[in-house]
Image: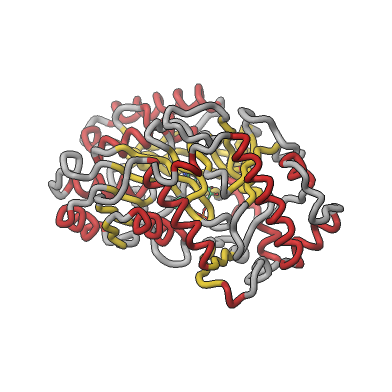
Amino acid sequence: MWNETAQTMPTAQLRALQLQRLQELVSRVHEWVPFYRERLDAAGVVPGAVNGLEDLAKLPFTSKYDMREVFPFGLFACASEDIVEVHMSSGTTGKPVVSGYTRGDLEIWGEVMARTLDAGGAGAGDVVQVGYGYGLFTGGFGAHYGSTRLGAMTLPMSSGNTFRQINTMVDFGTTVLACTPSYAMFIGEYAAEHGIDLPNGPLRAGFFGAEPWSEGMRAEVEAKLGIKAYDIYGLTELIGPGVAAECTEQNGLHIFEDHFYPEIIDSETGEVLPDGEVGELVLTTLTRTGTPVVRYRTRDITYLIDEPCACGRTSRRIHRLMGRNDDMLIIRGVNVFPQQVEEVLLRVEGVEPYYQIVVDRDGSMDTLEVEVEMASSLFSDEVKVILALERRIEHELKLALGIQATVKLVNPKTIERSEGKAKRIVDRRAVTTGA
Ligand code: DLL
């Protein structure tokens, strides 16, 4: 195991280390970052006031909105000449969020990403193809730093150019693929169409994240590529990928707790919930010095698992993400996460794992339409067969979600393929109400 000492540390020792690092974090941000100093002072927290991990709850939360206020460099907790690399969230709405890395932070990133790849059995001797985008997005560089740290042969492909991705896989005998799960699906589909037999080739593991995906999607990707598919989690504000990752047990994602401290809160009240209860994940960096973050509200919904894992890692795990607060659709008063729709679709024979969820408003009524591609075997079937399948999926969705949806089977290959984060929700309500 990569850095076994850190990853199998007895819990008491880990908690002591976390406390010491938390105290250092509070002193650092208080000294360097006016934004944190003001908020800590307002909350009555002076450095030295944190005497136990439970005192973390006294610290104010940080949100994406707070971070945007101090764009671009307002969160640096070191001299700006010590920052050697910068990444940024995509920021589709409002200003993006900046993460600045010191040399030390890049070391940490390489370390936690090496742990991520090692957790799924990758190592020196592997040929790792990085199909996450390189650039301000953290996926490409994160996977790259982890792979080179492990000593694997690293192919910095970036995302896109699918034909070349597949040829490179064949030519170099790629054994490990790192990209978004939706891009992995597309690569599998493209290879099959071009008569390239990836399932029986050397590819054996995939490290997929950066977007929501379901167990059903995992099964699809594993079959299409002939691999084990591991779920990996992270976000720009914290470091990028490398916050948590599945081990070969594929049963929850181990948080690299010596670097990132997790809490689960009730989104409404901000109250910290006990392990096992579902809520919003809040993360604190324990070792970063470029842009450390105190109690960042991720908006991601999951729960903490504090049970021993057969792999021997002692950290707590998060359950596969269940959705994001801000992706949750409220349709006629019912909460729906896109992953729930995906789970239903992938259980049905005769449809492909390419879909789009369209929410609209008809008068004062919210409408939910799910467009999903039919399998090519159905394509030439009679209309009544297709209609019957649509009604069946509508019935399944009603059972699972408790609301009526309209299902439209669309022709094969009509839903746009994704090379990065797939866009699966189209919410037309915001446009029609002008909100
Ligand atoms: O997506 C970092 C990353 C790159 C993670 C490569 C994994 C692999 P952001 O662009 O800042 O960073 O987006 C972060 O993506 O808050 C989640 O909502 C979502 N996300 C990331 N990983 C997963 C996952 C990168 N495994 C946001 N499952 C997060 C579901 C994920 N959602």
In the image, 132: left or right of 325? Answer: left
Across and down, in percent, residue 32 comes to 72, 67
Taking the image as drawn, is residue 368 in sight? no
Residue toward you, 336 or 83: 83
Quarter that holds the C terminus: bottom right
Image quadrant where residue 324 sits? top right
Residue, x 29% and y 59% (percent of image)?
154
Across and down, in percent, residue 243 comes to 52, 48
Taking the image as drawn, is residue 54 in sight? yes
- 334, above or below 296, in the image: above
Q: Residue furthest left?
A: 195
Across and down, in percent, residue 182 comes to 37, 47
Residue toward you, 212 or 333: 212
Residue, x 15% and y 50% (percent of image)?
194
- 352, above or below 174, in the image: above
Across and down, in percent, residue 252 comes to 48, 33
